[in-house]
Amino acid sequence: MKFTLIDDFLFMSRILCKQCQRPIIACICNFTCRIDNPTAVLVLQHPSEVKQTKGTVALLSRSLSHCQVLVGENFSQHDELNTILANNQALLLYPNAQAQVLSLTNNGLNSTHTSHNKQSQQPKLLIILDGTWKKAYRMFMLSSNLQALEQVCLPDTLANKGQYLIRKVAKKNALSSLEACCFALALLENELVEKKLNETECRETALNQSVDCGIYQELLTKFAQFNQFQLSFRT
């Protein structure tokens, strides 16, 4: 039996990868890498993002060895989340006015803002909200337990220059969940190193080439390849 190109495409689109459960033609397994992250990550994902093929949480969760995803909108009475919060020193990555800007010193945190009670002896946990800006805001406002957490954000040099090319976002150069998570982990764990560039290099170099995120750099490189892979379907 002879297949045309259209037949081949339709045939491949019906076969699912056993690992990522996506059609073989859109398999994302080549864009993941195994990273043993010291700081655990919890992604709170809005229900509308679960089947979003351009989302990056699938790459993130399949790459980080310590990463959990919970789906919902109002987490105030979420028993599993509240148990996790009771047993960890949770930091919520959320850029509001109260958020502490992560830096390259003191494991990313200003020591004057770090609590010295029993909670500070618990394992550190980074919480990410996965959704559009509007939906993430709604998740935060609905969830009183999230509002009570210590909130952190990325410095502007990282936060304003994302490489998320495949999806329209409300803010210019907004970061994907994967980028935001990798940058935050690198700062918290003293993995991020800024490269010293001259004026010409600064103008010509992309953000992901002007910093090195240590053990998370490979995943950021894979993410850039994932962007190009998704863009190839538009041609």
Image (cartoon, grey):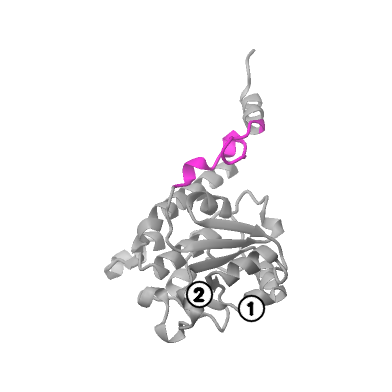
User: In screen coordinates, is 181 left or right of 143?
Assistant: left
Residue drawn at (52%, 49%) of the image? 62
Residue 153: mark: 2
Circle 1 residue: 147
Q: Tell me the amino acid under the disc marked 2.
A: Cys
Q: Residue at x 48, y 59 (%)?
A: 163
Neighbor class of circle 2 (other Cα within 10 Å; few <14, some 14-19, many 20+) is many
Q: Which mark is residue 229?
A: none
The reply to whether the C-beta atoms of the residues labelled 1 and 2 are less than 8 Å apart is no
Q: Position of residue 46 (x, y in %)?
A: 68, 61
- State left or right for residue 188 relative to residue 79: left
Q: Is residue 160 visible?
A: no
Which residue range is magenta in the image? Answer: 14-33
Q: Nearer the viewer, residue 123 or 149?
A: 123
Q: Identify the image quadrant of residue 139.
A: bottom right
Q: Is residue 3 above or below residue 48?
A: above
Residue 212 as seen in the image, left or right of residue 69: left
Comparing labels 1 and 2, the label whose residue is closer to the camera:
1
Residue 162 position within the rendered picture, expressed as x and y whole percent measured from the top left: 49, 63
Task: Answer whether residue 163 is visible to the viewer in this image.
Answer: yes
Mark 1 or mark 2: name the one nearer the start of the chain.
1
Q: Is residue 41 magenta?
A: no
Task: Residue lying at the far bottom in this picture: please name it.
Answer: 112
